[in-house]
Image (spheres, rainbow, N blue to C red):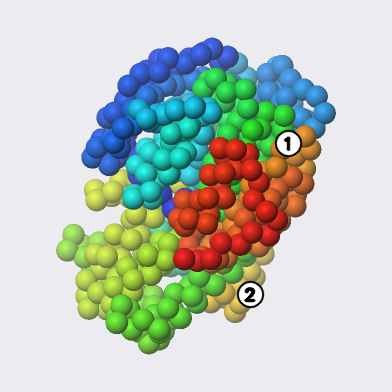
Amino acid sequence: MATAALVAAGCTLPAIAPRTEAGGEAAAPGTAPTWRACPEVAEELVGRGAPNIRYECARIKVPRNWDTEPGGGATPGPGAGATTGPGAGATTGPGAGQTFEIALLRARSTKQRDRIGSLVVNPGGPGGSGVDTAVYLSFGPAFGGLPASITDRFDIVGFDPRGVSRSSPVRCIPDADLDASFGYDPDPRSQESFDGFVALSRKIGRGCGDRYGDQLPLYGTEQATRDMDAVRAAVGDDKLTYLGYSYGTLLGATYAQLYPQRVRALVLDGAVDPRQGLVAGSEGQAKGFERAFGNFTTWCAANAGRCPIAPDARARVTSAIDKARVSPVRGDDGREATAGWVFYAIISSLYTESGWQELARAIDKLEGGDPEDVFRLADAYADRDSDGRYSNMFDANLAVNCADEEEKPSRERIRQLQSQWRAKYPMFGPALAVGLLSCTEWPGGRDPYPTGRADGAPPILVVGTTGDPATPYEQTPALAAMLGVGRVLTWEGEGHTAYPQTSCVNEAVDAYLIDLTVPREGLRCPAR
């Protein structure tokens, strides 16, 4: 699960979804949805709605298998991108004639003027809720949300992709298996321990295969991207304006290839390079998290007053994991802070620079016999509540990631990578290698997304953060180059994704979204 987990946290916003349904009766494919007021979604997520914001929800139906629809859902004409995958254009195949429901939420400012249209948002994952994200972004800059310059001109529209949260959710991994997976040793060195993780991964895969069978490839990225065009039509926009974070950049890039003439503006923040295979992507993350961890330890050494595990934070964190392997600290409820839970607390904290001090305190308290902060950090990452229940984020994450990937490394190859990456990326390499087992043991077919140019699309803004652990900066220029129409905006900051965090980044992105003004080539924004 390690790879799936690291890819899943492709958003800096919380991913805790309420279990309420967003919207009533779903609109049939191709028909306008009925919107209803839904302030309860914001109330359940945040405790209140944002000032001067109205929330409305709707549901639309989409074909389960766009490849069985006439034309495959692709835009006709030059550069539109051909339908790919088994059965393209056929009238039979998995899911033919069936539909999924896609949940939408629209946040509209009561101060809106000179409306441009809708800004469709996705937080990444795969598995993150766009409905939740639209709520969080509606709260304005003081709470990490969008500036008024954007909410005054756009409706903020979030959608839960197929299989995620409120949109025909995938559910096939028991909470106990997720607990076992997150709690497992991140570097199982003995053959017995490694084989135990193989068995757990196989059990998870078998359970999902038994439940969904030949439907599993239908949760892939290309199918979800075609749903995005149905969302664009449902909100009444001729062309898509989109803000995608992390994995959401892959959705945006795929949309630009399939529907280049329907693009108005795409902001792809925290870029994923679509041409990377499973192994290369996992190694890139190992490198990115190792770099971020090094930045954290350097900060600790220079800020001993704020870092209780200074001066050698790396040694203290490594020692905490080693001790957790043999003698895990037990919480008040009897739960044990195993090496796996400590590892995911570390992962969770590296997504934002503000998490560094939380990590230092958690490790210090763990050494003193109190694991509660470790559990709090790890549970926030895993989307696990206080009763031990999980959302379906990781069910969806596996379904999407494994449907997308043609590559399926053998167990022997994974075992070799575990050793090689331990030498190169000692904190994160082994876990990222072993995490490859998730898709190796996953049943069902594959449905890879396209990896080409977006000929015919307007300029697309690709934003990268130099200290990003989850989508390392090197992927930003790679995605821009692949699309052919990408323009890179660089933030010399820490953490995962950049907008809206500093005035330099905000001014460039806002001007692009509102006026379609593309930032000058090579623009770099300082950390502060």
SS label for mark 1 = loop
Q: Dot 1, crowdedness within 10 Å: few (<14), some or many (≥20)?
A: many
Q: Where is residue 393 in the image (x, y as percent from the top left)?
A: 43, 44
Q: Which amino acid does label 2 sit on?
A: Gln
View extreme (front): residue: 114
**Residue identified by numbered label 2:** 420
* Mark 1 residue type: Ala
Find residue 457 and name its label. 1
Q: Which residue lies furthest to the bottom in this view?
A: 311
Could you tell which of marks 2 and 1 lies nearer the N-terminus?
2
Closer to the camera, 105 or 366?
Answer: 105
- 263 relative to 22 in the view: left or right: right
Q: Tell which residue pokes out farthest to the right in this image.
A: 78
- Residue at x-position 62% and y-position 55%: 489
Nearest the camera: 163 or 329? Answer: 163
Task: Reply above or below: 433 against 153.
Answer: below
Q: Is mark 2 on a helix, strand or loop?
A: helix
Labelled pair 2, 1 in contact (Cβ < 8 Å): no
- Please indicate whether residue 120 sits to the left or right of residue 477 in the image: left
